[in-house]
Image: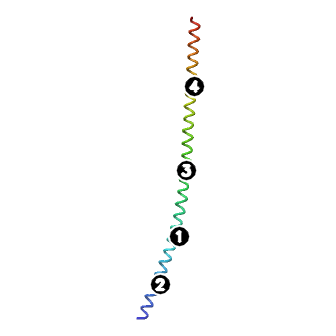
Amino acid sequence: MIAEKLNTQEAIAKSEQVLKEREEKYRQENELLIAERNLHMDRCLKIEETIDEKNERILQLEKELQRSLDEVNLRKEVIDSMSASLMNHENT
């Protein structure tokens, strides 16, 4: 009976040791996964920042293009108006 208790206690001790080793292994894996996730999130944030910067630049360029087109149209109108005025002056 004493031998059975010793065997049981040894088995329990071995089981506890195995469980502690597994727990430590899972902790290490968890820490590694957290570090990888953080790295991935940092990369995603950098990509988002780059996209935001590019979108801002696109909007700025679109505004500049529209201003340039407006200026070209205005110049055309001025030239057309001056041409019409000159033709009227020549005809009279």
* Residue found at the very far top of the displayed protein: 92
Amino acid bearing label 4? Val
Among the two numbered marks 4 and 3 on one chain, the one whose residue lies closer to the N terminus: 3
How far is disc 4 from disc 2 in space, using C-alphas? Answer: 88 Å
The disc placed on residue 28 is 1
Pointer 3 local density, CA inside 10 Å: few below 14, some 14–19, many at least 20: few
Amino acid bearing label 2? Ala
Residue 30: percent from left, percent from top: 50, 67
Pointer 4 local density, CA inside 10 Å: few below 14, some 14–19, many at least 20: few
What residue does disc 4 label? 72
In what quadrant of the picture does the C terminus appear?
top right
As drawn, 53 above or below 42 = above
How far is disc 4 from disc 3 in space, using C-alphas? Answer: 37 Å
Among the two numbered marks 3 and 1 on one chain, the one whose residue lies closer to the N terminus: 1
Q: Mark 4 or mark 1, which is nearer to you? A: 4
- Left-right relation of 8 to 36: left
Among the two numbered marks 2 and 3 on one chain, the one whose residue lies closer to the N terminus: 2
In what quadrant of the picture does the N terminus appear?
bottom left
How far is disc 3 from disc 1 in space, using C-alphas? Answer: 29 Å
Residue 59: percent from left, percent from top: 54, 38
How far is disc 2 from disc 3 in space, using C-alphas? Answer: 51 Å
Give the residue displayed 49% in from the left and 74% down from the top: 23
Quadrant of residue 42 within the rendered picture: bottom right
Please say if the residues under marks 4 and 1 sit with CB atoms less than 8 Å apart.
no
Give the residue displayed 55% in from the left and 42% down from the top: 56
What residue does disc 2 label? 13
Amino acid bearing label 1? Gln
* Residue found at the very far left of the displayed protein: 1
What residue does disc 3 label? 47
